[in-house]
Amino acid sequence: MQYPYSLDSTLAVLIQANLQFIISTDLFGNINYCNNKSAEQLKLENVLQQSDQKLLQLLSESDKLNYRRTVQKCLEDISQSQTVCFHSLGEMDFKFGIQFIVSVISDETFNAIGFLLIGQELTKPVDHPVELIKNDSLPYEDLKTLLGNKQIMVWMLDKNQKCKYANESIYTRFNSSPMQEMGKSFLNRFRLNALPETFTAFEKSLSEKKEFSLEINSQTIADQQLWLQIIGIPRINNNGFFEGFILYGTDISVIHDAAHSMKKQTELISILNKEYAKFKRLASISNQGILITNTINHITWMNDAVTNLMGYSYKEAVGKQDFQLFCGNDTSSVDISYIKSSVCDISSLHKEMLLYKKSGQKLWIELIKEPIYDENNKFCGFFIILNDIQIKKISEKEIAQQILSLKRMSFIASHEIRHEFTKIMQVTQTIQLQEPDIAVYQKLLGEIEKSTERVNKAIFELNDQINFATSNTLSLDAFLNQEIEEILLIDDDKLVNEMNRMLIKSVHPDIEVKLFTDVDYALSHIISNPETKRKIFVDLNFPQKSGWFFLDEYKKIGQPWSVVVLTSSLEQEDIEYSKQYEFITHYMTKPLNVEQLKQLKILSASRHQIA
């Protein structure tokens, strides 16, 4: 229970000692505090649980009368304390009674706000009040009882700083005796053993003759270091003259040692942080991917080179295990077992492994994994280095495939494309030599159209060979399998937009076609018309906000209508990356043609994702 009023050092020591009964009330007599001794021995626990429990209700009639008189005297002169004896308190009866010193509790403006009662049980009958604090010779018998707490060291000094009293706790802590303590200069105990700065502060506090609190060190039995929190309270007699000090000492060695240890740890952490900052600066400019894990192999840090190499952001990687993040279907299970074994055995690992980027691309990596230990040789985690060895790991089979592909590319370029190109040249020359004839022109234009289709097909095949026949041409079967009301064309090239609109109108004249050269305007239209059934064609490369930006924003809207990428890009990375958007059904390369649009199944409601 907390004392409800302002607490000075003396009263704090009395409460901590718990050797006397201590009770406080407000001006109306309601009990608002009692220490542990009062709660237990006077059985006031239940009393405190009741609201507005007055002290007078616990007293006999004669004790009530005496207490009222005592309180009245206190209020007549709030600077003087009074004594009163209770023979019973609540259910408790006492053979010789309890002697209490009653004093007024004042606020900062010296107005009475309550009463403080400090007392002890009498062991013999008395004819006059027992004074708990005297100004005559020492030692004080009653005060020795009060200060018999073994946890608190108590000295009483005269005005010349010589010891006139020391309690039993001092004799135990310093292996001394009354003969060694009494009448001796108190400062001699600390002069040789204390740190110079703490001793100087202690000596100054005593000379100022004011209340003080400070920490000072000394030595105990077997020269063990002892840190004390000492509270000094000056003793003033009734005439206002200084008579010495009462000093209360509490052993704070454990707290002081803990603080010292904490300071050392803080200094060590500061050094480690500086070294870590140096390491981060060096790692940030390294081309090698660098990762650090904790003791259970979870990634706790990585440099930017890992992001550049593998595609994972710092947030995506932290907390994951390295093999969980980078390994895929074709990663060797034996290699994964090696990684797991190195974690279990806390051993080094140096392997060349097939890993996977975030985009799904395969990448050959040289993986170096070393355990980390602190200055006490305690295991802290792993240090991992990733080196790109993709070029080194191109196998003979892949080289042979590349040679075959290059030969095929050479044939396409030198024969198939060249053949059709020369045919187009020949037709155009023939047209120039002919007299104007619509029937002839139509026939020759038909031949040009066939040749351009073959050239276009050859270019796609050439791209397939470059990418080793990866999925860069996609089926249109799953494209427009929804009923639609409008088609959106989003491309920064106005001419391309207009030609595509004319093409779509020639196949589907009843479908409304809207053109957008700005991504934000297209998104605004979609948000404003959420119920319209539509198909969306979007280009990827824009001068400002790209088609990828549109796809990210469209994903947030949550529309059910599919999107077709219509671009001139044949980059395999663009094709692979587009597969992460579930609403993209096709990746189409320009130009859009009539044959593709004729395959649209307007009345069908089925829909497929990118193969």
Image (cartoon, helix red, strand yellow):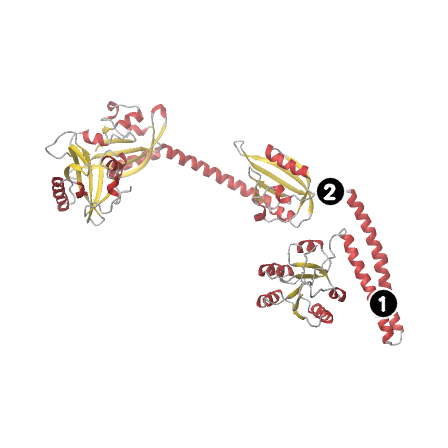
- The reply to whether residue 224 is in sight is yes
* Label drawn at residue 393: 2
Q: Is residue 135 above or below residue 286?
A: above
Q: Are marks 2 and 1 in contact (CB under 8 Å)?
A: no
First-in-chain label (2 vs 1): 2
Q: Position of residue 496 (x, y in %)?
A: 71, 68
Q: Is residue 122 above or below residue 439?
A: above
Point 74% across, 71% down: residue: 506
State how far apart marks 2 and 1 are (Cα).
47 Å
Determine the image quadrant of residue 152.
top left
User: Dot 1: few (<14), some (14–19), or many (≥20) neighbours within 10 Å?
Assistant: some
90 sits to left or right of 301: left
> Residue 74 or 99: which is nearer the viewer?
99
Q: Is residue 547 above or below residue 163?
A: below
Task: Classify mark 1: helix, strand or loop.
Answer: helix
Give the label, 2 or 1, closer to the camera: 1
Q: Position of residue 405 (x, y in %)?
A: 80, 50
Q: Check disc 1 and report the residue beneath it.
A: 447
Task: Classify mark 2: helix, strand or loop.
Answer: loop
> Residue 274 or 21: which is nearer the viewer?
21
300 sits to left or right of 37: right
- The reply to whether residue 135 is in sight is no
User: Dot 2: few (<14), some (14–19), or many (≥20) neighbours within 10 Å?
Assistant: some
* Label drawn at residue 165: none
The mark total stands at: 2
Q: Position of residue 564 (x, y in %)?
A: 68, 61
* Quarter of the figure with the C terminus: bottom right
572 sits to left or right of 142: right
Q: What amino acid is labelled 2 in the image?
A: Lys
